C-alpha cells in the first residue's frame, strides 16, 4: 500500500488503486503535486503521512480541506488527525465540521496566489476491533517491524493480541502469516487460518513458567504466534517472523533468556552441559529459527511436559556449544526424538548402547571396504605378474640363449603382448565392477539390518543421518582406489605394448639395412675384372690361374691349396741350359 510507489506484483491486487489507502485516494487529493518524497511511517498504533512542499496558498487550502473529508473513507475502527503548517503557523483538525474548516481557512489568504511553504501531516490512529487491525502501507509497516527494537514490537503485539489479530492490508492479494498474526486483503471474506485455542496458549504459558523465566519478554506470547505458515513474499516482514520465532523458541528452551533494546540477548541453558552466552545478536540467532522452533513446538505441544523440555535441553547441550550453531542441524531434533522413544521405555542408557552398536557395525563396514580395496589390488598385481612373467620369459631367456634381437621383437611376440594386455585389461575391468557391486550389496544389507534392528528404538532419519555419511565416505574411498589402480594398469600395459611395438619397428628397419649392405658387398666382389687380377699377380711374382668353371671334384679328400680354383700359385722355375 503505497502513496506514490507501485507495489510488488505478488502483493498487489489489480483492483486496488495505487495511491489509495483504505479508500483514501491521496493522489487525487494531492493533484498536480509530486508526493514521491512523502514520508510514510506505520506502526501498530498509527499511520503517518508527511508532505512538505511550496504551493500557492489557494492550492494548499484546497488540499487541506480535502484532507478533512477522509474520515468517512476510513474503517470505522480508525480515527484521523490532520495538521497543516503554513510559514510556521499550524492548525489541527480531526473531522470535517465547521469549526475544523474555520481553523484551516484561518491559515490561508482567500484567493491568494502567493506561494508559501506548506506542510501536511496526516495521522491515522488505529485500533483493534473484532480482532481486525488496519495496515495502510505494507512497506512502511515492514520497515517498522524490522528496524524497531524487537523487544518493543513484541510488547506492542502482546498488548493488542487477544487470541489472534487479522491485519487488514490495502493492496494485499492473498492471506498469509501465522495462526496468531494473519495478514488478509482489505475486505477479505474468504476462509481464514485456524487460530490457536486459548487452552493451547494457557497450557504452553503454564509449562513455560514451570521450566523457564524471562523478565524482558511478554508473558502472553508463545513460539507458535510467529510460526510463518504462509510467507507473504515481503522479505522484511518474513525476516521479522524469523527473528521473533527464534527469540521466543530460544526463550522457551532456555532456563533463562533476556532481551535488550539493542536486539541482543543473554541466555543460559542447563542440560548435560551448560550453554551460556551474552550479547548474542538476534540476527545471528534468526538463522537457526527453523531448528529452534521445531524443538520448542515438540517440547510444548499437546503432550508437552517438563521431562520433554529437560530432555531437549540435554540433547541440545551435547550437539552444540551455542544456540546459533544449530543452523542447518535438523539431526538434533532426530536425536531428541530417539532419546524420547528410549525414555518412554524406561531405559535411558539404552540410547548410548544402541549408538555404540551402530558405531561397531559402521566400523565393520569400513573394514569390509578396505578388504575390497585389497582384493582389487591383488587383481592388479596378478595382472602385472602375468605381464612381467611373459617379458622375463621372452627377453631374459632368449637373451641367455643369445637369440637375435629381431626374434625377441618379432611380430609374433608383439601380437602375444597385445593379446595378453587386452585380456588382463578386461579381467581388471570386470574385477572393478565386481568390487563395486559387492560394496553396494554390503551397504544395502547393513543399512537394512540397522533399520530392522533399531526402528523401534531410533527413528529412521537418525539412523540414516549416522550411516549415510559413513557409507558415502566408504564409497568415495573405494571409487578413488579403483580409479588409481585402473590408471596404473592402463599405464603399465600401454608402456609394455608401446615398447614392443617400437622394438619391432626399429629392429625390423635395422636388420633390413644390414641385409641390403651385405648383398651389395657380395655383388661387388664377384664382378671384379680379370685384368686387375693379372696385374695383381705379376706384381706379386706369381701367376694367377684362371678360375675353374667346372664343378668341384667329387672326391671327399681335402683339395690342396694349389688346386683350389682362383688361388695364387708360384710359377715353376725354368732350368738353365
Image (cartoon, helix red, strand yellow):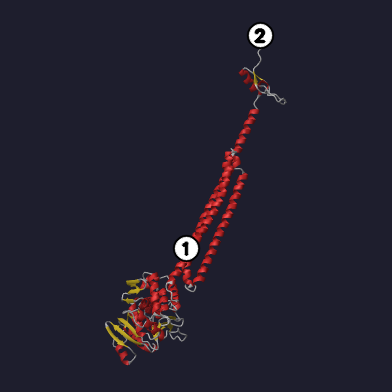
40 lies left or right of 371: left
Point out the frontmost of discs 2 and 1.
1
| Towards the viewer: 181 or 289 | 289
Q: Position of residue 432 (x, y in %)?
A: 55, 58
- What secondary structure is marked by label 2? loop
Reading the image, the residue beneath label 1 is 363
Pointers 2 and 1 in contact (CB under 8 A)?
Answer: no
Helix or strand or loop: what does disc 1 sit on?
Answer: helix
Relative side of 370 to 244, left or right: right
Residue at 35 percent across and 74 percent down: it is 269
Does residue 124 appear to the left or right of 481 in the view shown? left
| Disc 2: CA contacts within 10 A as few (<14), some (14-19) or many (>=20) | few
Q: Taking the image as drawn, is residue 398 in sight?
A: yes
Q: Hey, which quadrant is residue 412 in on the image? A: top right
Q: 230 and 197: which one is in front?
A: 197
Q: Earlier in the sequence, mark 2 or mark 1?
A: 1
Q: Nearer the viewer, residue 170 or 479?
A: 479
Q: Nearer the viewer, residue 252 or 470?
A: 470
Where's the C terminus, which quadrant? top right
Residue at mark 2: 576
Give the image location of residue 198, x and y in percent: 40, 86
Amino acid at each position: 500500500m503505497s502513496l506514490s510507489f507501485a507495489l510488488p506484483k505478488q502483493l498487489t491486487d489489480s483492483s486496488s488503486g495505487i495511491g489509495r489507502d483504505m479508500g483514501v485516494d491521496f493522489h487525487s487529493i494531492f493533484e498536480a503535486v509530486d508526493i514521491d518524497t512523502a514520508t510514510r511511517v506505520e506502526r501498530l498504533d498509527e499511520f503517518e503521512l508527511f508532505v512538505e512542499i511550496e504551493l500557492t496558498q489557494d492550492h494548499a487550502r484546497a488540499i487541506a480541506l480535502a484532507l478533512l473529508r477522509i474520515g468517512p473513507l476510513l474503517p470505522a475502527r480508525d480515527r484521523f488527525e490532520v495538521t497543516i503548517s503554513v510559514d510556521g503557523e499550524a492548525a489541527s483538525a480531526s473531522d470535517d465540521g465547521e469549526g475544523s474548516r474555520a481553523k484551516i481557512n484561518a491559515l490561508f489568504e482567500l484567493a491568494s496566489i502567493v506561494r508559501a511553504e506548506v506542510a501536511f501531516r496526516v495521522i491515522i490512529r488505529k485500533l483493534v476491533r473484532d480482532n481486525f487491525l488496519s495496515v495502510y502501507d505494507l512497506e512502511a509497516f515492514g520497515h517498522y517491524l524490522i528496524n524497531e527494537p524487537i523487544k518493543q514490537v513484541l510488547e506492542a503485539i502482546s498488548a493488542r493480541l487477544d487470541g489472534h489479530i487479522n491485519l487488514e492490508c490495502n493492496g494485499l492479494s492473498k492471506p498469509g502469516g501465522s495462526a496468531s498474526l494473519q495478514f488478509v486483503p482489505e475486505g477479505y471474506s474468504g476462509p481464514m487460518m485456524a487460530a490457536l485455542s486459548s487452552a493451547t496458549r494457557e497450557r504452553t504459558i503454564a509449562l513455560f513458567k514451570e521450566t523457564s523465566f524471562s523478565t524482558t519478554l511478554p508473558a502472553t506470547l508463545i513460539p507458535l504466534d510467529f510460526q510463518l505458515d504462509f510467507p507473504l513474499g515481503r522479505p522484511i516482514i518474513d525476516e521479522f517472523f524469523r527473528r521473533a520465532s527464534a527469540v521466543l523458541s530460544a526463550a522457551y528452551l532456555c532456563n533463562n533468556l533476556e532481551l535488550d533494546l539493542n536486539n541482543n540477548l543473554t541466555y543460559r541453558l542447563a542440560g548435560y552441559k551448560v550453554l551460556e552466552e551474552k550479547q548474542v545478536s538476534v540476527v545471528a540467532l534468526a538463522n537457526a529459527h527453523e531448528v529452534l522452533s521445531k524443538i520448542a513446538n515438540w517440547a510444548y505441544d499437546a503432550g508437552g511436559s517438563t521431562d520433554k523440555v529437560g530432555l531437549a535441553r540435554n540433547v541440545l547441550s551435547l550437539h552444540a556449544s551455542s544456540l546459533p550453531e544449530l543452523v542447518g542441524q535438523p539431526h538434533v531434533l532426530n536425536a531428541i526424538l530417539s532419546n524420547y522413544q528410549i525414555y518412554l521405555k524406561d531405559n535411558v542408557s539404552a540410547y548410548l548402547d544402541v549408538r555404540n552398536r551402530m558405531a561397531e557395525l559402521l566400523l565393520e563396514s569400513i573394514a569390509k571396504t578396505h578388504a575390497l580395496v585389497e582384493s582389487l589390488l591383488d587383481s592388479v598385481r596378478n595382472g602385472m605378474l602375468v605381464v612381467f612373467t611373459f617379458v622375463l620369459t621372452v627377453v631374459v631367456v632368449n637373451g641367455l640363449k643369445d637369440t637375435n634381437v629381431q626374434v625377441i621383437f618379432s611380430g609374433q611376440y608383439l601380437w602375444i603382448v597385445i593379446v595378453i594386455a587386452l585380456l588382463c585389461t578386461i579381467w581388471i575391468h570386470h574385477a572393478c565392477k565386481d568390487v563395486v557391486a559387492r560394496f553396494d550389496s554390503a551397504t544395502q544389507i547393513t543399512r537394512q539390518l540397522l533399520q530392522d534392528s533399531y526402528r523401534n528404538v531410533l527413528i529412521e532419519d537418525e539412523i540414516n543421518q549416522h550411516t549415510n555419511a559413513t557409507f558415502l565416505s566408504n564409497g568415495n574411498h573405494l571409487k578413488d582406489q579403483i580409479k588409481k589402480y585402473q590408471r596404473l594398469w592402463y599405464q603399465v600395459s600401454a608402456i609394455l605394448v608401446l615398447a614392443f611395438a617400437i622394438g619391432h619397428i626399429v629392429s625390423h628397419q635395422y636388420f633390413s639395412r644390414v641385409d641390403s649392405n651385405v648383398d651389395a658387398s657380395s655383388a661387388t666382389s664377384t664382378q671384379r675384372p680379370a685384368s686387375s687380377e693379372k696385374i695383381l699377380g705379376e706384381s706379386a711374382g706369381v701367376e694367377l690361374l684362371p678360375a675353374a668353371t667346372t664343378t668341384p671334384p667329387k672326391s671327399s679328400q681335402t683339395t690342396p691349396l694349389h688346386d683350389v680354383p682362383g688361388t695364387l700359385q708360384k710359377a715353376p722355375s725354368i732350368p738353365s741350359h
